Amino acid sequence: MTRLENKVAIVTGSSSGIGRAIALRYAREGAKVVCADLTLHPYSDATPTHEAIQQTGGQAIFQQTDVSNTAQMQSLVQTAVSAYGRLDILVNNAAMFMGGHEPSALHEADEELWHATMRINSKSVFLGCKYALAQMLQQDPHPSGDRGWIVNISSIASLVAIEGIGPYSASKGAVSSLTRQAALDYGPHRIHINAICPGFVRTPLMLAAATDPASAEEYNRRHPFGGLGEAEDIASIAVVLASDDARWTTGVVLPVDGGYTVR
């Protein structure tokens, strides 16, 4: 498992859920990982992600980061370069869902929720791409000839409508559109920029819904593969998109959703 050997990766939102799964898998594939999140323990007292990597012989560090803050995102990229000499991979994963609000019709949506969702879900991806791309452009290419790999975590909500989550859908729509635009602009520089659109994945945010019998039955009905996916299902694809296996792949907005969107 060395598809990411000699690559340096930043993973935002790395303390739990999909971000944690990606960081752990990247380390197993040989990457040096800079873990970034607001806190080490957002949902549990599990071993912090970077420590879990270190305990298995991998290389990782943690930097507390507000991904919507310009200076902190710039500092995050600088930290990766200071620690490991370069930056090869950025995973823009950190995001918020509904901020504790129940899904609602757009005319009832909270304006502050809209602003917060756009700041954390969309502005953060812009900032991450901005500073990662600047670094990738100025460093020597990877031995493969490529200069970098960016994996944005979008959502199936950017592809199909889901009731009552207007702010979230709009924010992820921006992520998917920016992915395609950036892929076009930076393709000539051999920088791969792709997005994964997870479906309903078993993360701390989804656990309550998944344990409700009626909801569980509905998730089974809506997914051809049945039920929720796992964070590791997203991590596996994130490895591919950051590896030489994706040598001729950029601008892809890929649903990984157990077949949800084919309905």
Image (cartoon, rainbow, N blue to C red):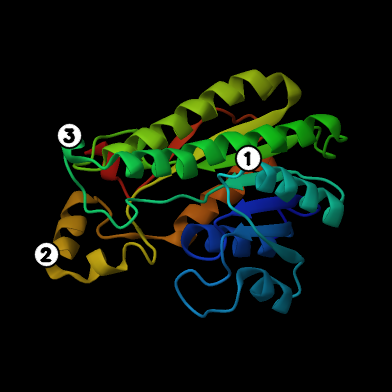
Query: For residue 5, what is the image quadrant?
Result: bottom right
Camera-side mark, 1 or 3 = 3
In this rendering, the answer to whether 15 lies above or below 96 is: below
Which comes sooner in the sequence, label 1 or label 3? 3
Please state the horizontal and vertical placement of residue 177, each as a whole percent of the image. 46, 26
Q: Residue at x 83, y 46 (%)?
A: 86
Disc 1 to disc 2, how far (Cα)?
39 Å
Q: Residues within 10 Å of mark 2 (few under 14, many from 20)?
A: few
Which residue is outermost to the front? 112
- Residue 128 is labelled as 1
Q: Residue at x 45, y 60 (%)?
A: 231
Disc 3 to disc 2, how far (Cα)?
27 Å
Give the total number of marks visible in the rendering.
3
Location of mark 3 (residue): 107
Check if mark 1's residue and mark 3's residue have beta carbons within 8 Å.
no
Amino acid on which the number 3 mark rests in the picture: His
For numbered disc 2, what is the local secondary structure?
helix
Amino acid on which the number 2 mark rests in the picture: Ala
Please state the horizontal and vertical placement of residue 78, each as a whole percent of the image. 79, 47
Confirm whether residue 243 shows in the render. no
Which residue is outermost to the left? 214
Q: Is residue 228 left or right of residue 66?
A: left
Q: Is residue 129 left or right of residue 144?
A: left
Please state the horizontal and vertical placement of residue 110, each as a whole percent of the image. 26, 42
Query: For residue 145, what is the image quadrant?
Result: top right
Camera-side mark, 1 or 2 = 1
Location of mark 2 (residue): 214
Looking at the rendering, in which quadrant would you find the N terminus?
A: bottom right
Q: Is residue 33 left or right of residue 145?
A: left
For numbered disc 1, what is the local secondary structure?
helix
